[in-house]
Amino acid sequence: MPRITVTVDGVGYEEEVEPRLLLVHLLRERLGKTGTPVGCDTSNCGACTVMLDGKTVKSCSVLAVQADGCDIVTIEGLGSPGSMHPMQRAFHEEHALQCGYCTPGMVMAAIDLLRDTPDPSEEAIREGLEGNLCRCTGYCNIVRAVRRGAQEMGQAVKSS
Amino acid sequence: MTELDPGLVGEQIAESDQISEPGGTGGEIGRSRRRKEDARLLTGHTRWTDNLVQPGMLYVMFLRSPMAHARITRVDVSGARGLPGVFAAFSGQDFADEQGSLPCAWPVSEDIVIPDHPPMAVSEVRYVGEAVACVVATDRYRAADALEAIEVDYEPLPAVVDMNDALTEGSPKVHEAGNQAFTAKITSGDIEAAFRDAPVLIDRTYIQQRLIPSAMEPRAVLASTDGDGFTLWTSTQIPHVLRVMLAVTTGIPEHKIRVVAPDVGGGFGSKLQVTAEEVLCLLLTRRLGRPVKWTESRSEGNLTVHHGRDQIQHIRVAAESDGRIRGLQVDLLADMGAYLMLVTPGIPMLGAALYNAIYKMDAYEFGCTGVFTTKMPTDAYRGAGRPEATYAIERVMDELAAELGLDPVEVRRRNWIRHEEFPYTTIAGLTYDSGNYEAATDRAMALFGYDKLRAEQADRRDRGDPVQLGIGVSIYTEMCGLAPSRLLGESNYGAGGWEHGTIRMLPTGKVEVITGTSPHGQGHVTAWSQIVADTLGVPFEDITVLHGDTAISHKGMDTYGSRSLVVGGVAVLQACEKVKDKARKLAAHLLECSPEDLEFAEGAFQVRGTDSRKTIQELAFAAFTAHSLPEGVEAGLDSDSTFDPDNYSFPHGTHLCAVEVDTETGMSKIRSYVAVDDVGKVINPLIVDGQVHGGIAQGIAQALYEEAVYDAEGNLLTTTMADYLLPSAADLPTFVTDRTETPATSNPLGVKGVGEAGTIASTPAVVNAIVDALRPRGIHDVQMPCTPERVWRALEGVRR
Ligand code: FES
Ligand code: FES
């Protein structure tokens, strides 16, 4: 069985994995990183989105072996209840989550969106989040949250 | 993408732009509190059922029928049993003696046929996806391998897919007793007189396509036993109802079953069910003595989570020449699918008293036939019967307006119940306690810019603009707060509609609230905290709310039908009042005065006209130590209460939608959407807006995107999210929402419920807008979902 090394939320792991094991199952079932959920089996919903070497991927469509040597950040590594990432805080302030199932993926996708478009328009946000489905919110407050997160992250960059 | 009116959107953002601040006492109700639930959910500290692990846990997978209808002639699981990591494999025959029949709790009529519904098929399958065998293995990959080693032989039987075909003489039968599940009829007033010589007659047939509820969290079940009792963690909306039903179905004594709904990722009615997988996981853990977990894949879920809608609605209106309605006649065919599940036959009946909606009339007749087909059973989906009713009546009101050359709002005005007429008993027999359709409609029209948009529409029509503008009106009411137990009994529902709440003041003055509701995104922890904070005068932060575990919340009727706040929130309020009564007695005893001399404010009892006082926290501690209690007062400051409303609540609202329809491509684009809802008193405006947004999105999804499609052989063609089109952010506009407020009179909070309002209102608003855009071209209907292809074909049809 292939042996891989990965860093997840700052912790290094060495694991023997079946070649067919999905990254999301490595995270959830081997490493106990259950903050990243699974919403579909066709790479449509985006619930499983994580950062892999700084770029978002849908972890249900990456094999664990493909992540060998990579640095992964999940929603759990982004912030904690006591000290949330500005985007997590913005989701809270704008009531951009209801059941919260889509939320980890949505927050990850939102942060990724701002890398290319630090001050996105509503249209850019809507297009940018097209790969992440939410059944609860109707997206209005998610769009507001991403704008708010963008402002706060922009300010954080300026003031640092 | 939708263009936005920047003025309106700016106003909305400004309104919601208050940030969280720590609480004091009072003023919590009506405040946009940020949710207590969020921090955990936002940082991945979640307890979805699939996250949970038990020592020695095994994974279950089900083999499902690829045939819509067939006799099972052989199931051989022996090939699976020998494989590495495989613990067990079973066929339906292996459960035949113990699995019972999945329950239907709502036998709506005398003539109803409730067929046997084994959790795992034994001799016959009746829809694609029905479980025929299962494997239990050490992980999900090995379980998936093992499924492939199971052999099943089927002898095909004819599929029954279309409801009209199913009812024709000589149709193949889904069940031995035939394809008719039940019939129901309601008549009020002289319907024949109303239709006789009516100056205007509108006669239409609408199709409510089948929908897949699609909560983002797939279902999951984890069952374990300690050799004596059983615990079932499951992604459900109804832990309490489920516990009773599991006991009845399996014969395991109720007190030996604990059901936990941990974090649940949305439901929308789809998790208001007693599922085959829940029963089978319970039986598997009993048989194997090991914890077992099953988590569905999305494709499995699309096949086997109950579906919604699927009705053919024949609706006729007789009216005077000024547009006033004389009578309304509705005849439904409702597709039950292959079996009657928990409330399957009750869904069309939930709309039975709502086709007349907000309108006055002399006569009403409602008929419904439930039909069996070889498809996944239908059951509750957001709104459940009420969206269907609202769609048909609001579509037909537009047809009436068009027939008479009246503005759609005007024809509604001529028929609706005026605000001074409340309380009003409708032709269908419901008593609407309060409402003000005029106020909501005026506000919505102002926000929408109704007259300006009509002018633009006229201009585009005159110019022959290829992009036509349509304006859709939908003015709805619904019955919520399910439900008065007495009325449920009258409708032959198998349970009551009360709700339970407990308040426990802890020795240190903190408060534990226990609720019988089972939230899965609705924010009960926050809203219930607001109610308790104001009623007991304790800080919002000092309150915790426990729910969704039958071992903790020992009584409850769970969450569905926009009932949680209206019934469960009120139970919590009443429990607070009881705690206060007890605290008052204790305070009087300690302060050596009579209870009537005390006034309660800001969380303390104070002897009138003095500064001698006891805070509720001090009283909680005194009740805990019990060193000095008055006669007849027991230790501990806690209490519980159940609330059973004496009427439904009736939220209402006016939704307006402007759609641009490109007559060359058939493409429809929502340009603006305004919703003014009256949900009575509001506990948390932020949460209410969120519910409205999500509801509108789901209703738009029915109008424009979603449809579960079966082929003639009964195969579901929309098994994945690539085929079943859930709208993304890019497919929807920003909604403008506002409220008017007439408090409900049937509960002390004055609340009406908001979970389903948006979904009920928005579907007809969108379709009315599309038809309004096309009407000058001779088009009077477009079948949902109104895809570009369907709109284009409708236009082609009239061009020829
Ligand atoms: S679970 Fe990965 S995209 Fe849906
Ligand atoms: S918050 Fe429930 S799916 Fe997005």
Image (spheres, rainbow, N blue to C red):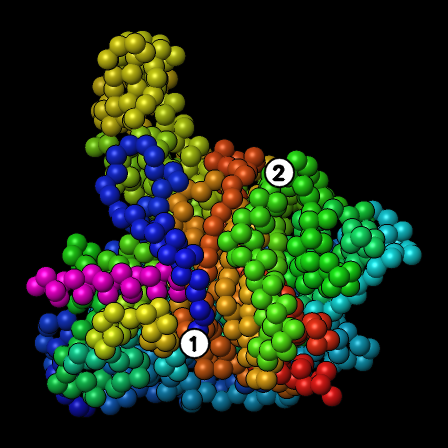
Which residue is drawn at the image coordinates 77% and 74% (left, top)? B167
Give, as a three-letter code, the residue at label 2.
Answer: Asp
For this view, does B592 lie left or right of residue B327?
left
Q: Earlier in the sequence, mark 2 or mark 1?
A: 1
Nearer to us in this view, B194 or B462: B462
Task: Name the secondary structure under disc 2.
Answer: loop
Q: Can residue B375 be seen here?
A: no
Give, as a three-letter code, the residue at label 1.
Answer: Arg
Nearer to us in this view, B701 or B301: B701
Q: Can residue A77 be seen here?
A: yes
- In the rendered image of this protein, does residue B430 appear above or below residue B765? above
- In the rendered image of this protein, does residue B226 appear above or below residue B15? below
Mark 2 or 1: the one toward you? 2
State the image quarter where residue B80 is shown: bottom left
Question: Is B532 colored magenta in this rendering?
Answer: no
Which residue is drawn at the image coordinates 91% and 56% (left, top)? B196
Q: Can you identify the residue that label 1 sits on?
A: B298
User: Quick one: quadrant of the N terminus of chain A?
Assistant: bottom left
- In the rendered image of this protein, does residue B81 appear above or below residue B606? below
User: Quick one: quadrant of the C terminus of chain A?
Assistant: bottom left
User: What is the chain identity of the residue bearing mark 1?
Assistant: B
Q: Are marks 2 and 1 in contact (CB under 8 Å)?
A: no
Mark 1 sits near ligand 1, with its Cβ under 8 Å away: yes
- Report x, y in % for residue B179: 73, 72
- Report x, y in % for residue B245: 52, 56
| Numbered label attached to residue B433 | 2
For this view, does B240 lie left or right of residue A108?
right
- Report x, y in % for residue B729: 40, 70
Which residue is drawn at the image coordinates 47% and 36% (left, top)? B749
Which residue is drawn at the image coordinates 25% and 75% (left, top)? A117
Q: Which residues are magenta?
A: A137-160
